[in-house]
Image: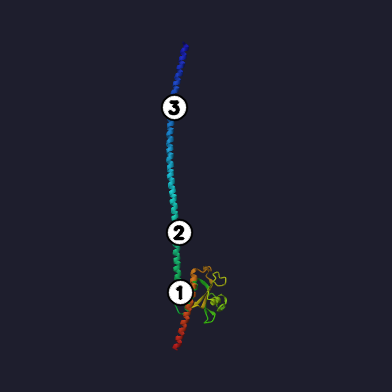
Amino acid sequence: MNETKEHGGYVLKVREETTRALATLKSENERFRMQLAAVESDRARLHQEKLNVQEQLMITRDHLTRSVDDHSSLVRRLMDVERENERVAGQFLDIETQNANLANLYVASYQLHGSLDRDEIVAAIREIVINLIGCEDFGIYERVDDEEKLRLIGWFDVSPESSQLISFGEGIVGRVAATGEAIIDEHGRSGIVAAVPLSVNGRVGGVIALFRLLPQKGNSLERLDHELLNLLASQAGIALYSTALHADATRRRAEGAL
């Protein structure tokens, strides 16, 4: 009888403990299920946030790409504008230079034909050579009547004693007088930078010889210098010839008056 009671109490105790264990397991299982649901919710939320961040990153990347493209386009346009400005500035400078050259040529031409006085014409040639061409050592030679000889009539720094009279064909100056063709040697290796004939109707009436340019010229003749030399070659001879005709006419009138 006692054993039966003891056995029944043990079973009841095991049953109670089993019931409590089951209740505990159910409670833990419910807690784990709720935690899993929370984790799944967080995972879904994080995934959505990730998608949102990726979308924002793509939008930002697109904006950045467009900004880079816009910046590159603006840089290219700015470079184009700068090149155009440089081109226009270069054209403007060329026009200014051409205007200045034309003004200098006009002044030189006016000086050569502004007088019939021989000394004034020689002084005008000197001024053109010194101030417009920039030569510090030169000689102006004129033909001696109908002879094939040249006489030094104007100079600057050149020694008149060494070249007062030059025959046609003698040296570079004489060669220019004989051939009627200019000689240009900007480096001055021959001792002359330039020698140009002064011709009237194909007849050489004189020669202008440049022996040394001013230091700032660097022994280099510019485009304007060549144009001025051409002007002298075509106009200085005519100007000197005109002064000779004027002097001869004046002399004839004076003799006729006597």
Q: CA distance from mark 1 to mark 2?
A: 38 Å
What kind of residue is marked 1?
Ser
Percent x, y for residue 224?
48, 69
Sequence-first disc among 1 and 2: 2
Near mark 1 (Cα within 10 A), the count class, few <14, some 14-19 or many ≥20, is many
Write the residue at 46% across / 12% down: 4
Q: Residue at x 45, y 68 (%)?
A: 98
Q: Secondary structure at mark 1?
A: helix
First in sequence: mark 3 vs mark 1: 3
Number of callouts = 3
Q: CA distance from mark 3 to mark 1?
A: 117 Å
Residue at 51 percent across and 72 percent down: it is 135
Image coords of residue 205 (percent x, y): 51, 78
Residue 32 position, x and y percent, is 44, 29
Q: Which amino acid, by three-letter code, is at mark 2?
A: Arg
Give the labeled residue for mark 2: 83
Residue highlighted by disc 3: 29
- On residue 109, which mark appears? 1
Q: Quadrant of the C terminus?
A: bottom left
Residue 225 versus residue 255 in the image, above or below = above
The amino acid type, in three-letter code, at marker 3 is Asn
The answer to whether residue 124 is seen in the rendering is no
Indicate the secondary structure of the residue bearing disc 3: helix
Disc 3/disc 2 C-alpha distance (Å): 79 Å
